[in-house]
């Protein structure tokens, strides 16, 4: 990997999921993204979405137009999941027709689950605009992966991810093997 774009999911005004044990999605992933940048400033470029103005598609389109001006080998959007207290585990999503996207999504999901001792839920292919996260995976020129490393709603998952810097170091190690 020569250049990787890291996009923080959600926005500063609409921060995504909350957790009883961790900062909310946007705050948590900002910290992870900044740590990646610190680990290797020449490999990682960090992006945040401006706002949901015009809707989810419009937001992803503006971000993609910026990112696609440059050339990246991989684009990640950082999230975390939230559901019932029992749901747990790591998963990654990719655009269904992207072979590279699928390969990277599989590796990242498997390796994050190994390093942080979570259940590997595997990958989800996103097929159409109603699939959550679809436009990110579709609009990026580089292979794109949505990373959902844990469920903030599950106490055991959340405690394993207490330190966003540790998570960033794990991600960096995985990315260096892709
Ligand atoms: Zn999210």
Image: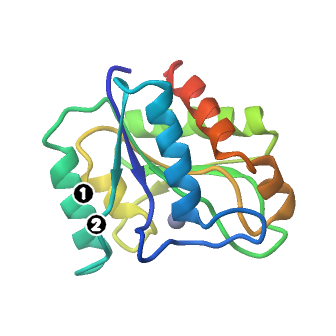
Residue farthest bottom in this picture: 54
89 or 36, which lies in front? 36
Mark 1 residue element: helix
| Residue picked out by circle 2 | 50
| Residue 127 against residue 140 in the figure, above or below | below
36 or 138, which lies in front? 36
Residue found 79% across the figure and 45% down from its top: 118
Near mark 2 (Cα within 10 A), the count class, few <14, some 14-19 or many ≥20, is some
Asked if marks 1 and 2 touch (Cβ < 8 Å), the reply is yes
Query: Is residue 65 visible in this depiction of the protein?
Result: yes
The location of residue 101, given as percent across then percent down, is 41, 39
The location of residue 134, given as percent across then percent down, is 38, 62
The location of residue 80, given as percent across then percent down, is 61, 59
| Residue picked out by circle 1 | 63
| Quarter of the view holding residue 37 | top left
Q: Which quadrant: the N terminus?
A: top left
10 or 93, which lies in front? 10
Q: Which label sits on residue 88?
A: none
């Amino acid at each position: 990997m020569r250049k990787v774009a890291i996009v923080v999911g959600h926005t500063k005004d609409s921060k995504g999921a909350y957790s009883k044990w961790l900062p909310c999605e946007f705050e948590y992933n900002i910290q992870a993204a900044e740590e990646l940048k610190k680990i290797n400033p020449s490999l990682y470029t960090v992006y945040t979405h401006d706002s949901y103005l015009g809707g989810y598609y419009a937001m992803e389109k503006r971000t993609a137009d910026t990112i696609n001006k440059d050339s990246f080998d991989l684009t990640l959007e950082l999230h975390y999941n939230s559901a019932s207290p029992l749901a747990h585990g790591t998963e990654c999503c990719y655009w269904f027709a992207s072979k590279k996207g699928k390969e990277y999504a599989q590796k990242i999901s498997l390796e994050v689950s190994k390093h942080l001792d979570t259940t590997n839920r595997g990958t989800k292919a996103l097929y159409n605009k109603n699939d959550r996260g679809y436009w990110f995976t579709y609009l990026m020129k580089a292979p794109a992966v949505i990373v959902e490393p844990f469920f903030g709603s599950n106490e055991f998952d959340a405690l394993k991810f207490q330190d966003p810097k540790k998570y960033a170091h794990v991600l960096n190690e995985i990315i260096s093997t892709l």
